[in-house]
Image: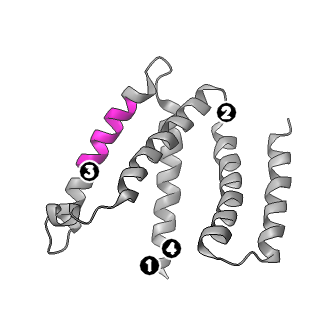
Amino acid sequence: MLAYLWPLILVVAANTAYQICAKSVPQDMDPFASLTITYVVSAIASLILFFIFGRDTTLLAEYSKVNWASIVFGIILVCLEVGFIFAYRAGWQVSVLSIVQSAFLAIALIAVGFLLYREALTPNKIIGVFICLVGLYFINKS
């Protein structure tokens, strides 16, 4: 059970800290300059963790396995980060933005799962989409 729960706990804790950091980037700082620091720190942390948790392999051996996903993932992460920074600068509340984007993300991923991965589109998922949309209405109603 712990092997199932600890990644979820890590994601929730990290995402909470992530939202605080994204909202705390100084207003007068260029978000892309901020992200250069973010990604240098991330690269160093990833390198250290590779050597701490790495198996019997080398970094170059692992780099030889890279495919398009790692490169596109890097571009997408920048889009994600800058999207949150600009959303907070536009006035989104930290208590609302994540919920709204998560609901729309859930809806999008149901479609992706169905169209690309042949996952079942069950009545429960359709009802869940409807509930998400109703929830979005109430969250955004002032």
Q: Amino acid at mark 1?
A: Ala
Confirm whether the magenta stretch covers residue 37.
Answer: yes
> CA gap, disc 2 to disc 4?
30 Å
> CA gap, disc 3 to disc 4?
23 Å
Q: Amino acid at mark 3?
A: Ala
| Disc 2 element | loop
Residue 125 image offset from top left, x and y in percent: 77, 71
| Disc 3 element | helix
| Front of the two marks 3 and 1 | 3
Task: Answer with mark 3 or mark 4, whichever residue precedes in sequence.
Answer: 4
Against 1, is 109 above or below? above
Confirm whether the magenta stretch covers residue 124.
Answer: no
Nearer to us in this view, 68 or 3: 68
Describe residue 7's horizontal placement relative to residue 109 as left or right: left
Chain part drawn in magenta? 34-44
Q: How many numbered discs sit on the rendered protein? A: 4
Q: Are marks 4 and 1 in contact (CB under 8 Å)?
A: yes
Residue 14 image offset from top left, x and y in percent: 46, 53
The residue positioned 86% from the left and 39% from the top of the image is 141
- Residue behind mark 3: 45
> CA gap, disc 3 to disc 1?
23 Å
- Residue behind mark 1: 3
- Residue behind mark 2: 92
- Residue behind mark 4: 5
Task: Answer with mark 1 or mark 2, whichever residue precedes in sequence.
Answer: 1
Q: Amino acid at mark 4?
A: Leu
The residue positioned 49% from the left and 55% from the top of the image is 13
Task: Answer with mark 3 or mark 1, whichever residue precedes in sequence.
Answer: 1
